[in-house]
């Protein structure tokens, strides 16, 4: 009987390391690992050797950083997509691209199935499986963590020790870490208690604000149609620019997020994130939009940003709705051009200046000096017409907002 061939989305972390060996035992399968380089640093060191040592028949490690930044991060940035107004969604954005890479290898190797290392109560299972369903509906998807015998990460660690599988997680430091160029997510261990302050060893790429430099750093970012194209007057590609921002913002303690969020599956989870570069870019991009978008577009886009973020977080990247919203967002970004100067200081970020050839800010209209050119008399007619519906309503409905006051008779001597 021909052996089953399974392509596994492989990070080299605890879960996927166990999966390679477990699939061989339970499915009698040849396992091919697929790893996407989304700009992460530590996770790629010795990854191929680890995969082969764990039992993989073939190992694919693909450099997807440029595609990730340009085709996933920049659209999310232009949309202003922050889940629950906070999280830049590094993990959420990476999953559809990793699923795409997994499907491409599975088809090339004529695999009968793909597998992922997502838990049965997490969001990533949805993101992977919906993406696979969109890209290759004929492929079977195996989710070992939903069916295997292990009840805890401690049991997985014991399994690795038994089979000589090298992993970085230990019982003393059982963090689950997912990293790419857009950000890092850290969970498990003591972080599962929302009352516990994240220990220093939980953070991977930012210094604590207390240990950040005593002098602020100023960074000037140039945007063209909503996309960052340079720092400090120097043009840069997306990967170089993000690496640069991650370094300078991380050194100033910027980009730490501690969030209790609503998962798609209906539970709340406490997550710790680090997104130094993404935090700076979202802030700068938003400030430039304040300068260049007219009021109606700006207010309506805020609603779209919320919906766009939900689509990403909920695993619906490869959907007609996300593609359609992308068209709206791209249209709004045609005038989002210019430079934004930000001040980074001990974990904080402040606006230090902004300028755009498409600026809608007119000093002669905004000023209160003798140079004021605003027609103040025009406001009389404007307020009269604007307030007419309110005035009419309360003329008809006389028992309106004001309640009758009870008169208190004062006693006199």
Image: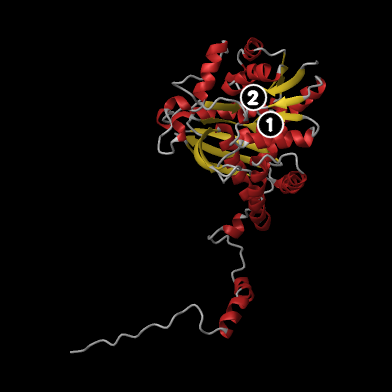
Residue contact at pointers 1 and 2, CB within 8 angstroms = yes
Helix, strand or loop at label 1? It is: helix
Question: Which of these two is toward me, 87 or 50?
Answer: 50
Q: Is residue 407 left or right of residue 391?
A: left
**How many neighbours does mark 1 have within 10 angstroms: few (below 14), some (14-19), or many (20 or more)?**
many
Residue ID for mark 1: 69
Q: Total marks drawn?
A: 2
Can residue 229 be seen in the rendering of this structure?
no
Q: Position of residue 144 (x, y in %)?
A: 64, 26
Residue drawn 59% across the image and 45% down it: 287
Could you tell me which quadrant the N terminus lies in? Answer: top right
Residue drawn 63% across the image and 51% down it: 302
Question: Which of these two is toward me, 1 or 93?
Answer: 1
Q: Position of residue 41 (x, y in %)?
A: 59, 20
Q: Position of residue 54 (x, y in %)?
A: 63, 13
Could you tell me which quadrant the C terminus lies in? Answer: bottom left
Can residue 299 be seen in the rendering of this structure?
yes
Furthest residue toward bottom: 413
Residue ID for mark 2: 39
Considering only vertical position in the picture, is 27 above or below 363?
Answer: above
Considering only vertical position in the picture, is 287 above or below 272?
Answer: below
Q: Quadrant of residue 277?
A: top right
Q: Is residue 122 left or right of residue 208?
A: right
Residue drawn 78% across the image and 22% down it: 111
Q: Position of residue 320 (x, y in %)?
A: 78, 45
Helix, strand or loop at label 2? It is: loop
């Amino acid at each position: 009987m021909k052996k089953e061939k399974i392509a596994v989305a492989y990070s080299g972390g605890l879960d996927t390391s166990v999966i390679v060996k477990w699939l061989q035992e339970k499915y009698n399968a040849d396992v091919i690992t697929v790893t996407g380089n989304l700009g992460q640093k530590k996770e790629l060191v010795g990854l191929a050797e680890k995969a082969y040592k764990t039992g993989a028949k073939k190992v694919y490690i693909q450099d997807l950083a440029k595609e990730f930044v340009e085709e996933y991060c920049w659209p999310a940035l232009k949309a202003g997509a922050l889940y629950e107004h906070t999280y830049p969604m590094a993990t959420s954005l990476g999953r559809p691209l990793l699923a795409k890479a997994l499907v491409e290898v599975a088809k090339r190797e004529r695999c009968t199935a793909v597998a992922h290392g997502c838990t049965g109560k997490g969001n990533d299972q949805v993101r992977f499986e919906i993406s696979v369903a969109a890209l290759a509906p004929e492929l079977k998807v195996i989710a070992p963590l939903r069916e295997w015998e292990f009840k805890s990460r401690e049991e997985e660690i014991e399994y690795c020790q038994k089979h000589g599988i090298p992993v970085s997680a230990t019982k003393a430091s059982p963090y689950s870490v997912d990293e790419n160029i857009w950000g890092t997510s850290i969970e498990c261990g003591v972080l599962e208690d929302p009352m516990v302050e994240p220990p220093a060893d939980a953070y991977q790429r930012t210094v604590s604000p207390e240990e950040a430099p005593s002098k602020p750093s100023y960074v000037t970012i140039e945007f063209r149609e909503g996309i960052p194209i340079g720092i400090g007057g120097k043009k840069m590609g997306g990967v170089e620019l993000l690496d640069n921002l991650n370094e300078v913002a991380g050194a100033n303690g910027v980009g730490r997020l501690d969030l209790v969020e609503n998962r798609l599956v209906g539970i709340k989870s406490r997550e710790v994130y680090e997104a130094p570069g993404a935090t700076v870019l979202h802030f700068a991009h938003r400030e430039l939009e304040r300068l260049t978008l007219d009021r109606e577009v700006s207010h309506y886009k805020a609603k779209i940003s919320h919906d766009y973020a939900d689509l990403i977080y909920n695993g619906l990247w490869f959907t007609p709705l996300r593609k359609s919203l992308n068209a709206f967002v791209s249209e709004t970004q045609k005038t989002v051009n210019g430079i934004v100067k930000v001040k980074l200081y001990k974990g904080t970020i402040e606006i230090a200046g902004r300028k755009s050839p498409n600026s809608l800010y007119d000093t002669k209209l905004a000023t209160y000096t003798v140079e004021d050119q605003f027609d103040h008399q025009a406001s009389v007619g404007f307020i009269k017409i604007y307030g007419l519906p309110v005035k009419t309503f309360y003329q008809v409905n006389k028992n309106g907002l004001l309640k009758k006051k009870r008169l208190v008779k004062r006693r006199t001597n």
